Amino acid sequence: MGINVYLTTNMGAPVAEPWLDPGGVLPRVLERAPRDSHCLQFIDPYGDTIFNRLQVSTLIAEFEALRADVLDPELHAHIGSVIAYIQMVRALVSQYVKFVGD
């Protein structure tokens, strides 16, 4: 199973269609994340992890750095689509990015 990503309000209501990971690629991507990352290391593949709008810039920068080191075209494209989805939260006020694992 994968890790799905949602944009939500502070009350947990969705504000966009979710980014779905039915093939379970995101957990494979996160295995490559540095253990000293500020955000990526905390994404729980078995639970929920929430980042606020102030943390999104760091989260995106870490995904971009990870994508730059990935040579596999499937993983590279997958990371790019996650980044594009997360960037939508920048335009919204009081919104959150929620990663939902198994």
Image (cartoon, grey):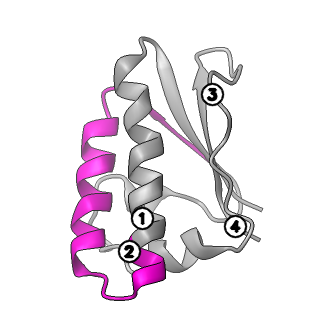
Disc 1 versus disc 2: distance between alpha carbons? 5 Å
Q: Looking at the picture, which amino acid does disc 3 mark?
A: Ala
Query: Which of the two discs, 4 and 1, labels the residue nearer the N terminus?
Result: 4
Disc 3 versus disc 1: distance between alpha carbons? 19 Å
Residue at numbered disc 1 = 79
Q: Dot 2: few (<14), some (14–19), or many (≥20) neighbours within 10 Å?
A: some
Q: Height in image: 25 above or below 83? A: below
Q: Is residue 42 visible?
A: yes
Residue at numbered disc 3 = 16
Left/right of residue 91 with respect to residue 57 in the rendered view: right
Disc 4 versus disc 2: distance between alpha carbons? 16 Å
Residue at numbered disc 4 = 2
Residue at numbered disc 2 = 76
| Residue 50 at x, y percent in the picture | 54, 39
Mark nearer the viewer, 4 or 2: 2
* Tag 3 secondary structure: loop
Image quadrant occupied by the C terminus: bottom right
At 34% from the left and 37% from the top, the residue drawn is: 56
In reply to whether residue 62 is colored magenta, the answer given is yes
